[in-house]
Image (cartoon, helix red, strand yellow):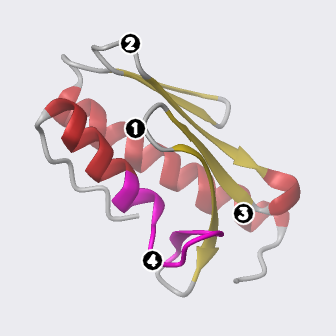
Amino acid sequence: MTSLTEPAFHRIADQALNEIALALDARLGETLDVELQEGVLTIDLEDGGRYVVNKHAPNRQIWLSSPRSGAWHFACEGPGETWVSTRDAGVTLGGLLRDEIAAATGVFVDLAI
């Protein structure tokens, strides 16, 4: 795991959350309610499901609450600043959200973060 200073963590995490929000809003803004405020991203699905993605500064992680797969924690890994699951190194934040949003909406949104 990459050791991040608190300012670096906030910069990288804010960038990741912003990229997710912008990508989802651009492709699904008329279908989903996407809101990013103060480091918390909420994504409301048409079926009533809600994703919450937020920064957890004490652990230098991004946490995800998914209506489909439950709770996940992601740590920033490597030079590409990829957010990788702390329980399954084969799962990334962008990949998990991409797949679950595509299953829920039928629309593929590239979330390469």
Amino acid, disc 1: Ala
User: Mark 3 or mark 2, which is nearer to you?
Assistant: 2
Q: As rendered, which of 38 and 64 lies closer to the eye?
A: 64
Going from the N terminus, do you reach mark 2 or mark 4 first?
Answer: 2
Amino acid, disc 4: Gly
Alpha carbon separation for disc pair 1 and 3: 18 Å
Residue occupying image coordinates x 29% and y 37%: 24
Residue occupying image coordinates x 55% and y 73%: 88
Q: Quadrant of the C terminus?
A: bottom left
**Does dot 4 land on a helix, a strand or a loop?**
loop
Residue indicated by mark 1: 21
Q: Label for residue 48?
A: 2
User: Mark 4 or mark 3, which is nearer to you?
Assistant: 4
Residue occupying image coordinates x 14% and y 47%: 108
Residue indicated by mark 4: 90
Q: For residue 83: magenta?
A: yes
**Does dot 1 land on a helix, a strand or a loop?**
helix
**Does dot 2 land on a helix, a strand or a loop?**
loop
Please state the extent of the stretch shown in magenta in the rendering.
81-96
Residue indicated by mark 3: 9
